[in-house]
């Protein structure tokens, strides 16, 4: 399916007004689709799989900001650390430590978001509320090659938009609490929430970054 540039311009304008950044989620889509959106002006792209991201990064323009939005395994951190712009889905301190370790080797500081579990579905990764607010800020201070700059979350996969809004409100509340907790250590600026089906609600509830795939690139041909 061709890239929907008309939808791109509409969404982009809406998000500029809302003050949110657009990450175009290109997982499973070919490099030429990414280039089509790149030519329309898009620079932030999100991928879910390490090998796919590494392959695409190697063949696409160097000024693309690559976002890793999938579930990251510790043993694969080293492959994306040389170039990744922002890792959205950090779901444990152990993973953060591994990112710090690999980033230190190449003298980079990697921007990361902690993933928070706000949906009721059991398949979603992330910290729950207690775990997030229980993080010892001093532990973050000990990771100089990692910059925790915000939170990321996914609402329930449901047509009940009231429920989705409630979950986004919760994430915004947690973001504000986490900012107080880590004041002086983390400089939070990113609240990554909202996808194709719910990004307008997310923007209304304080999202500063939305991750949109299917509205831009068409439906994906698999069920992930
Ligand atoms: C695939 C994916 C998206 C984009 O989903 P769409 O519904 O196609 O917009 C956003 N965030 C994450 C974490 C994803 O895995």
Image (tube, rainbow, N blue to C red):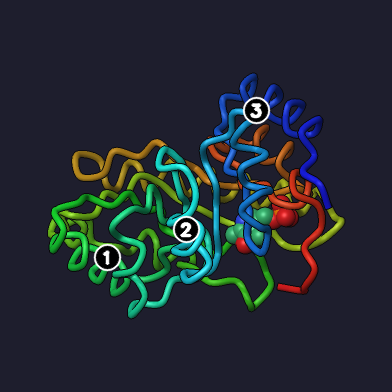
Q: Quadrant of residue 223?
A: bottom right
Asked if the residues shown at circle 2 and circle 3 are in contact, with their CB atoms under 8 angstroms apart, the answer is no
Q: Quadrant of residue 6?
A: top right
Q: Residue at x 63, y 77 (%)?
A: 123
Structural crowding at the residue carrying mark 2, measured as other residues with C-alpha within 10 Å and reported as few (<14), some (14–19) or many (≥20): many
Which residue is nearer to you in this view: 159 or 11?
A: 11
Instruction: Using the image, determine if residue 217 lies above or below residue 16.
Output: below
Image position, residue 48 (x, y; %):
55, 64
Q: Of the numbered discs in the image, which one, if any, rests on residue 15?
A: 3
Q: Which residue is mark 2?
A: 68
Give whichever of discs 3 and 1 has the lower sequence position: 3
Secondary structure beneath label 1? helix
Q: Nearer the viewer, residue 49 or 162?
A: 49
Residue identified by numbered label 1:
99
Give the farthest residue toward the top. 17
| Residue that extends furthest to the right in the rendered view of this protein | 159
For label 1, count other residues whose C-alpha is less than 10 Å away and answer few (under 14), some (14-19) or many (20+). many
**Tag 2 secondary structure:** strand
């Amino acid at each position: 399916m061709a890239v929907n540039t008309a939808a791109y311009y509409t969404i982009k304008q809406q998000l500029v007004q809302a003050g949110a950044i657009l990450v175009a989620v290109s997982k499973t889509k070919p490099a030429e689709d990414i280039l089509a959106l790149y030519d329309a002006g898009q620079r932030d792209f999100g991928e879910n799989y390490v090998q796919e991201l590494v392959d695409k990064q190697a063949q696409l323009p160097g000024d693309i900001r690559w976002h890793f939005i999938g579930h990251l395994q510790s043993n694969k951190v080293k492959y994306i650390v040389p170039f990744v712009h922002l890792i959205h889905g950090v779901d444990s301190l152990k993973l953060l430590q591994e990112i710090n370790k690999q980033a230190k080797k190449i003298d980079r500081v990697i921007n990361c978001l902690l993933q928070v579990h706000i949906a009721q579905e059991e398949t979603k990764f992330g910290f729950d509320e207690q775990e997030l607010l229980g993080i010892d800020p001093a532990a973050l201070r000990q990771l100089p090659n990692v910059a925790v700059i915000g939170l990321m979350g996914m609402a329930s996969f449901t047509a009940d938009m009231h429920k989705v809004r409630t979950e986004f409100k919760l994430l915004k509340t947690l973001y504000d609490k986490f900012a107080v907790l880590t004041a002086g250590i983390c400089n939070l600026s990113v609240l990554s929430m909202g996808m194709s089906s719910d990004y307008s609600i997310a923007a209304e509830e304080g999202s500063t970054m939305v991750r949109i795939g299917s509205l831009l690139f068409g439906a994906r041909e698999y069920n992930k």
